[in-house]
Amino acid sequence: MEGKDAITTESTLLLNLTTVATRDTDGFLRGFPGKNSPYTVTQAILIALVLGSIIVGTVIGNILVCVAVFLVRKLRRPCNYLLVSLAVSDLCVALLVMPMALLYEISGNWSFGAIMCDLWVSFDVLSCTASILNLCMISVDRFCAITKPLKYGVKRTPRRMIVYVSLVWLGAACISLPPLLIMGNEHTYSESGPSHCVVCQNFFYQIYATLGSFYIPLLVMIQVYYKIFCAARRIVLEERRAQSHLEAHCYLDIEPTVQQHQPAAVNRQLNTDVQTSHGSPPTKQHRSSSASTT
């Protein structure tokens, strides 16, 4: 009798838990993605799956890059310091920026407050600017390595590369910190409508940030990679010219040696063919050769 009561009690408890979970799930689905969202439930789920996969892939890929450089001794070189810095900046974007951006995009409402808005926007600008500046610095490093391989190879020390990485993050901080410390970002709060979080819209700051974090690095990379292309093409042409010159000299050096080691009969036949091609009769050559023999 007591066993039946225990089974009945456990069944009732399990049924109650299932009912509560079902009710909460239904309430979540009815409230998802939110009244201010521009997407339907199906669209929001698809967007969450796609962007969530991108976030996970970004995190895993950049962690693997950092682990490979730190664990593999051959990769632990100064030239890869900028690559690790690039991976760290992309990792910051994936961990600190993209999750909140995903929730903000799906819900259509910023629900984290003004302080988190300032921090989120600052981390967004910092990480993205650092990523772009890392790419710019990598292009300059490759250009110096190609155009001045011996001279720059000696100068590419760990201390110098750490200075380059520090300059990259310092430049990114100079662009991302003014809204956080001085100007402030655009955060609007509304009880009836959606709340929003936008980067500082000051005209002069927009010009300053856009030039420093996008247009100037873009122009530098275009010019540097064009010079890299020209330098690589010049190196290839010089190698081809040197190879053809070397082959020509080798042919001229080998040809007299081959003729010296040819038999006398072959030389006489070659002389006969040459004189025949110039119109002189071959019999004279045979007579002169026989006379010289006697």
Image (cartoon, rainbow, N blue to C red):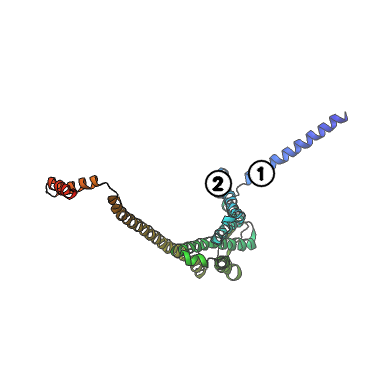
- x then y, percent, for residue 97: 59, 57
User: Residue pushed farthest top?
Assistant: 1
Q: Nearer the viewer, residue 9 or 72?
A: 72
Instruction: Specify the label residue 27 is tagged with.
Output: 1
Is the residue marked by circle 1 packed among few (<14), some (14-19), or many (20+) residues within 10 Å?
Answer: few
**Residue at point 57%, 55% (across, down):** 74
Residue 106 is left or right of residue 225, and the answer is right
Q: Is residue 128 above or below residue 35?
A: below
Point out the frontmost of discs 2 and 1.
Answer: 2
Measure the alpha-carbon separation of dots 2 and 1: 24 Å
Q: Position of residue 223 (x, y in %)?
A: 42, 64
- Residue placed most toward the observer, 19 or 121: 121
Q: Secondary structure at mark 2?
A: helix
Q: Is residue 70 left or right of residue 223?
A: right
Q: Which mark is residue 50?
A: 2
Q: Is residue 209 left or right of residue 115?
A: left
Which is nearer the N-term, disc 2 or disc 1?
1
Q: Does residue 146 appear in the picture of this structure?
A: yes
**Which quadrant of the view contains residue 73?**
bottom right
**Residue 67 % position (x, y):** 61, 54
